[in-house]
Amino acid sequence: MIERMKKEDLDEIVIIENEAFTKPWDRDYFIHEIDENEFSELYVYRVDNEIIGYVDLWYMFENCDLTKIAIKRDFRHHGYGNRLLNEAMKIAKDKGSEFMHLEVDVNNEDAIRLYRKNHFEVVRTREKYYENQDDAYDMVCGLIGNATRKVLAIESSCDETACAIIDENRHVYSSVVTSQIDVHARFGGVIPEVASRMHVEQISTIVDQAICQSGLTIDEIDAIAYTIGPGLIGSLHVGATAAKSLAFFYDKPLIGVHHLKGHIFVNEMIKPLEYPLMALVVSGGHTELVYVENDNSFKIIGTTLDDAIGEAYDKVARIMHEAYPGGPVIDRLAKEGKMSYQLPTPKVGDLNFSFSGLKNAVNTLVKKETEKGNEINKNDLAFSFQETALRFLVNKTKKALEQYPCKCLVLAGGVAANSRLRELMQENFKDIDLILPPLKYCTDNALMIACAALHYLKYGKVVSLVASSKPGMSIED
Ligand code: KG4
Ligand code: ZN
């Protein structure tokens, strides 16, 4: 509970003040602030009747100066500082302030992190501002139009367990991902039963870590999101159960996100998307050209008739006795290779794809060469396969854009991490606003689910606590 400071509070306040600051205010100064400074308002933060922190706000025209914020030592690092700052910002905004300003020691990393998290920006440095000669940052945050709805999202559709918290400004409070890839690598692919058991073991820790790292309390979260499909049914269930438990217990709206929409919307971490847009979705389970007319309308205009591109990478790597996942391995090998093996470019109509013929051709080639006693040049084979597959992808995308003119082209999914594909996209799509996701957002994570969830929230698209997971869900659903 936050309330105005009274003189009776000062016994407790002075103790906190003395432990928090090297040059503390004394009791008389606080009395002056309470009684005489007409610009100042002091607030205390009480938990179970105990004062655990306080702030001092000075109002000057459209600006509110945060002259002091303190949290009792035993209560630090539990999100109370963040809570108190948020309350102070709300109070100032309600009073009509347009900005909040503060000064902070440039070496006070914890405080600076807290302010940045709440959208404060450094506007100048005051040299040797403090008595110990430390510099200070002037930090300012706008209070008007600061959309701050926050979503906690969980991803568990395949072999990554992840949780992230972001707000409508795409500000990332936390993003935690743990991968099971080392375990599955021993079997050459994801074993669904092992995956769901490992999700069960990880999920509580990951959600806990995401909340702790965010510095937020669950009260400050506006909605809980999770991947409803597509994916492995057992894996999806674990994330769904965790999300539903949180939504039920804390009475929050629940959002069931399509995994591939996550891969598309994570590109907003780079810049806002413009519509209509074309998404080339390339992952372990999907290869799709998706025409996105607006953020609520998705149409599949091309899809694979057999294997997904990531699956083809994984299988070709396996044929070459290389580790799982095959994508990164082939990407690396191909860098040293050349086009010395002739492989057939897939032939399939419309805007569709096919990769099983290409994969079989690699298999036949390896068998024949091995029978003849010839050694395969892995670098060259990786290059030949990759170049054939990727040029096919790029050409179909060009065709799609001719038929469906768009303002923006985005690459999405695990295979978007491929270095050669990124190169080819940049070479071939110079006349359109091309967005390539940063590598850290290509493979599965929960940030992408949170990005998509914000769009669901905008349209009020929530699901009930008994919603079923949908392993084969289409992006058009
Ligand atoms: O999107 P994702 O993490 O999981 C699914 O939703 O399927 O994609 C995983 C796929 C795997 O097939 C993996 O081999 C592939 O993405 N991949 C790559 C690269 N990194 C991951 N494929 C080609 N080149 C890469 N650098
Ligand atoms: Zn994925």
Image (cartoon, rainbow, N blue to C red):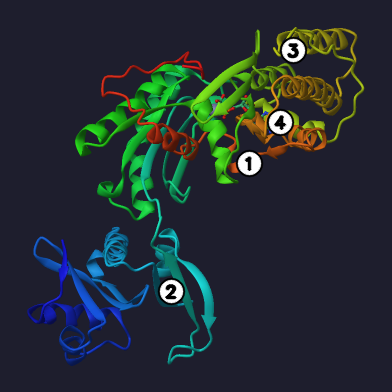
Task: Classify mark 2: residues with Cα within 10 Å, few (<14), some (14-19) or many (20+).
Answer: few
Q: Mark 2 points at which residue?
A: 108
Q: Which of marks 3 and 2 is in front?
A: 2
Helix, strand or loop at mark 4: helix
- Distance Cα–Cα, label 2 vs label 4: 43 Å
| First in residue order: circle 1 vs circle 2 | 2
Dot in front, 4 or 3: 3
Q: How far apart are marks 3 and 2 (CA)?
A: 56 Å
The amino acid type of the residue labelled 2 equals Asn
Relative side of 412 to 316, left or right: left
Q: Earlier in the sequence, mark 3 or mark 2?
A: 2
What numbered label is drawn on residue 141?
A: none
Amino acid type at mark 3: Lys
Contact between labelled residues 2 and 1, with CB atoms less than 8 Å apart: no
Identify the mark nearer the N-term, 2 or 4.
Answer: 2
Q: Is residue 212 above or below residue 343?
A: below
Quarter holding ligand 2:
top right
Q: From the viewer's perspective, is the residue at label 2 or at label 4 nearer?
A: 2
Label 1 CA crowd tier, 10 Å (few <14, some 14–19, many 20+) = few
Quarter residue 396 falls in:
top right
Q: Mark 3 points at which residue?
A: 359
Indicate which disc, 4 or 1, sits on the residue closer to the N terminus.
4
Q: Quadrant of the N terminus?
A: bottom left
Residue 439, which numbered label? 1
Q: Are marks 3 and 2 in contact (CB under 8 Å)?
A: no
Where residue 463 appears, x then y in whole percent? 32, 24
In the current view of this chain or complex, which residue is farthest to the right? 340
Determine which quarter of the picture holds residue 428.
top right
Identify which amino acid the numbered label 1 is placed on: Leu
Label 3, label 1: how far apart the Cα atoms are:
26 Å
